[in-house]
Amino acid sequence: MTTTTPRTHLEADPALPTIRIVRDFDAPPERVYRAYTDPTLVRQWLGPKDTPTHIEHWDARTGGNYRYSSWRDGEKIASFYGSFHELRPDQRLVQTFTYEGAPDCVALETVTFDDLGDGRTRVTTLSVVESLQIRDAIIASGMERGVVEGHEQLDALLAAE
């Protein structure tokens, strides 16, 4: 499965339990990386537009961890948590990602921040899960909408800085 919005490319290799997301941003790597690691910024762009993110804990350092939740109409609708395994400023972020409602579906995510020059950055996220069934369930959950709308919100945040 491959889908592409005007700026977000999402690919699920039919033979591998992976999801690859590629998106270019009109900001240099240090600003985009900061938006991925600073909890004040993360809560402003992560997820669908109609589900504000509440950061419950955020320790963005190698060996740190995080927990956040998504809300709609004043109600918590989902919670997520994970561990930061490696942070290389402006270059790379490796973390686990778990939806609290499916704790047996841990994803290992590697996010790279490639400098395209002219103040632009390509962010590539590779998520690896245990099986094709888990990968397909994640995609069916509506994650694509959250990713695309989150990227649109990140565009606006980066433009405003």
Image: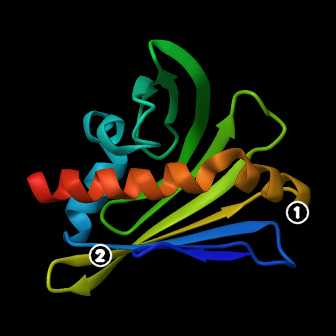
Relative to residue 119, is residue 97 depicted above or below? above
- Disc 1 secondary structure class: helix
Calculate the distance from the C-alpha at mark 2 to the C-alpha at mark 1: 30 Å
- Asked if disc 2 and disc 1 are in contact, CB closer than 8 Å, the reply is no
Q: Residues within 10 Å of mark 2 (few under 14, many from 20)?
A: many
Q: In front: 18, or 154?
A: 154
The answer to whether one can see residue 20 in this image is yes
Q: Residue furthest bottom?
A: 117
Q: Residue at x 63, y 44 (%)?
A: 97
Q: Residues within 10 Å of mark 1 (few under 14, many from 20)?
A: some
Where is residue 75? Give x, y as percent.
52, 13
- Answer with the quarter of the image where residue 11 lies: bottom right
Colouring scheme applied when the structure was drawn? rainbow
Q: Residue at x 22, y 63 (%)?
A: 30
The image shows a total of numbered marks equal to 2
Give the left or right position of residue 8, taking residue 108 as reference.
Answer: left
Query: Which of the image's four quarters has the N terminus?
Result: bottom right
Q: Disc 2 or 1, which lies upstream in sequence? A: 2
Mark number, residue 132: 1
For the residue marked with disc 1, what is the amino acid?
Leu
Mark number, residue 121: 2
The answer to whether one can see residue 161 in this image is no
Q: Residue at x 46, y 58 (%)?
A: 148
